[in-house]
């Protein structure tokens, strides 16, 4: 079952060192968070689309464009009606709106989409193994990253079990689309039981498998199955990301890209 | 929170982290009942998994729920700054019910019998509110979604749906987990999970924090008054007063969770090592 957005292509982003990609995420996330003017937010969004193209993630967009559109519309609506305003031009009970709140809402919708694009670009060019490798290299304990790796591995297996159980029950006449929320909740809960039972039953086998591979055994140094080399671009990428974040923070402090005095 | 650290010494707990996380993510992604706020929150029966697993597997479920949320974000392409708060919030979604149950009921097993509902409900609701407060604060502080909307949506989903699902699943899964020897009490030593003397105080602190978070989400004006009284009438820098109230309540909840946890150094049950005896006994059974 294909769940991950990862694409096996040879893009410039795919070739970067896992630690570099993970660390570059932090300054890259600063860019959308820095501005709340829709024009500046749109510029950042276009920049993140460039990142998506660089990561070879344009074909992955069909899986998230619907979500992106909903986020844009809902964020615009929510913030337009709920941004604390001292001088609203329209008010109804706790809801109030003004041209500023509408623009702020639009900027927040674009911000969410920019963050989504960075996330899509990252997961399209980074395998879960690279993600956990990077976590280990930045100091997360090996046992914890092993548990995270196992979680990544087990999700498709349990999701396949969930699908099998659902299909089997639907073949017997279970209808998950009809009825109110409570009725549907009652129909969903019995589907969870076999999935959980399957998971619990595999716990002992997994424990033995891990122990037989030496988990918990005393060792002086761990070795990695995959090793990654650093090149000049791996040094340059975090510098570029940091510079972009620094420019964004400086611009905001100078008053650019701000329509409301809040994040 | 010693239990969340010492549990990594036990292979079975490591496996339970992965299984809880995988089950949570695998059930969360496809099983949706209804949408609360399009694009942000849906009614999902998976909300009950961290509560049930927290009561059965203790600290392993807390890490599992946190990892499951990260994995869900990675698979959905939603990995972002909000994932950090999702990690902490989902950790609390499982950890708070587990610690609160221990503070309220001590060593009595959470087997999900009907008589246990009066204790199960406050434990599950407190976990849901803790999760809602932390995620609501983090996401609102970054200006992504209004604090009230997200906090109330998560509290409603995890509090109501999570509690109903937990009440149904617990009596079914408890005997299964016990028969496989997967309960945290079967794996950890008593000194590693027994509550400290201040666990009741911790429970009250968690409820105070959860109450502030909920009130701040419902009554924005109340949150602004509260912040004005402590000298933050305009919030803090770029963070609005209502969001700041959510942030303070999140810190209060985390402090309460720490007070509920085992604080002293306890005696370990058994160091992690390959269970040769088990493997041998299996082979002899087979032979």
Image (cartoon, rainbow, N blue to C red):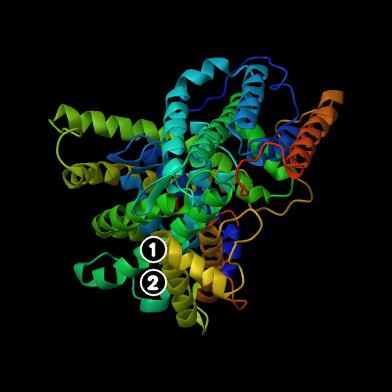
| Residue B56 image point, x, y percent | 39, 61
Is residue A79 visible in the rendered image? The answer is yes
| Residue B275 image point, x, y percent | 54, 55
Total count of labels: 2
Which of the 4 image quarters holds residue A149?
Answer: top right
Is B186 left, or right, of A21 in this rendering? left
| Residue B178 image point, x, y percent | 35, 61
Q: Counting other residues with Cα less than 10 Å from the Cα at mark 2, is it few (<14), some (14-19), or many (20 or more)? A: many
| Residue A24 image point, x, y percent | 73, 35
In this picture, is A188 found above or below B182? above
Q: Counting other residues with Cα less than 10 Å from the Cα at mark 1, is it few (<14), some (14-19), or many (20 or more)? A: many
Q: Which mark is residue B101?
A: 2
Residue at x-position 77% and y-position 29%: A228
Q: Farthest residue in the right direction?
A: A232
Q: Nearer the viewer, residue B177 or A74?
A: A74
Residue receiving disc 1:
B55
Is A223 left, or right, of B130 in this rendering? right
In this picture, is B11 found above or below A109? below
Is A119 left, or right, of A204 in this rendering? right
Q: Is disc 2 in contact with disc 1, using a CB cutoff of under 8 Å? A: yes
Which of the 4 image quarters holds residue A155?
Answer: top left
Give the alpha-carbon distance from disc 2 to disc 1, as whole Å: 8 Å
């Amino acid at each position: 079952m294909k769940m991950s957005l990862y694409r096996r292509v040879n893009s410039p982003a795919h070739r970067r060192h896992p630690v570099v990609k993970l660390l570059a995420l932090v300054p890259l996330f600063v860019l959308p968070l820095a501005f709340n003017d829709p024009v500046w937010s749109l510029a950042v969004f276009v920049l993140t689309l460039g990142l998506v193209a660089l990561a070879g993630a344009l074909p992955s967009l069909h899986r998230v464009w619907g979500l992106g559109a909903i986020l844009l519309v809902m964020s615009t609506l929510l913030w337009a009606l709920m941004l604390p305003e001292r001088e609203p031009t329209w008010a109804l009970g706790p809801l109030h709106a003004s041209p500023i709140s509408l623009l702020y809402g639009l900027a927040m919708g674009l911000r969410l989409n920019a963050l989504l694009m960075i996330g899509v670009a990252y997961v399209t060019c980074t395998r879960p193994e690279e993600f956990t490798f990077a976590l280990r290299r930045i100091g997360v304990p090996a046992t914890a990253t092993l548990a995270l790796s196992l979680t990544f591995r087990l999700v498709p297996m349990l999701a396949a079990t969930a699908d099998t159980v659902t299909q089997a029950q639907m073949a017997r006449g279970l209808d998950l689309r009809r009825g109110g929320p409570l009725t549907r909740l009652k129909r969903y809960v019995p589907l969870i039981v076999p999935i959980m039972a399957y998971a619990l039953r595999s716990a002992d086998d997994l424990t033995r498998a891990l122990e037989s591979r030496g988990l918990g055994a005393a060792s002086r140094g761990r070795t990695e199955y995959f090793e990654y080399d650093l090149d000049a671009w791996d040094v340059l990428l975090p510098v570029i990301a940091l510079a972009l974040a620094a420019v964004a923070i400086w611009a905001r402090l100078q008053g650019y890209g701000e329509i409301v005095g809040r994040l | 929170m010693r239990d969340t650290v010492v549990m990594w010494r036990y292979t079975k707990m490591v496996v339970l982290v992965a299984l809880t996380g995988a089950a949570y993510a695998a059930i969360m992604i496809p099983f949706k009942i209804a949408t609360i706020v399009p694009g942000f929150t849906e009614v999902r029966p998976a909300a009950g998994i961290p509560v049930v697993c927290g009561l059965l597997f203790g600290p392993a479920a807390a890490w599992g729920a946190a990892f499951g949320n990260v994995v869900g974000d990675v698979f959905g392409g939603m990995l972002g700054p909000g994932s950090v708060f999702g990690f902490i919030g989902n950790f609390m979604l499982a950890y708070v019910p587990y610690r609160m149950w221990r503070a309220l009921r001590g060593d009595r097993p959470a087997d999900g019998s009907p008589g246990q509902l009066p204790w199960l409900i406050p434990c599950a609701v407190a976990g849901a509110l803790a999760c809602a407060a932390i995620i609501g604060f983090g996401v609102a502080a970054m200006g992504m979604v209004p604090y009230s909307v997200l906090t109330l949506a998560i509290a409603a989903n995890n509090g109501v749906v999570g509690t109903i699902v937990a009440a149904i699943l617990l009596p079914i899964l408890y005997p299964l987990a016990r028969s496989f020897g997967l309960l945290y009490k079967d794996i950890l030593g008593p000194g590693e999970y027994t509550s400290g003397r201040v666990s009741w105080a911790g429970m009250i602190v968690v409820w105070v924090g959860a109450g502030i978070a909920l009130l701040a989400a419902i009554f924005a004006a109340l949150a602004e008054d509260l912040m004005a009284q402590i000298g933050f009438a305009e919030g803090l820098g770029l963070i609005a007063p209502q969001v700041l109230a959510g942030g303070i309540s999140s810190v209060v909840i985390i402090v309460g969770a720490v007070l509920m946890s085992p604080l002293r150094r306890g005696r370990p049950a058994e160091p992690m090592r390959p269970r040769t005896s088990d493997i041998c006994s299996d082979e002899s059974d087979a032979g």
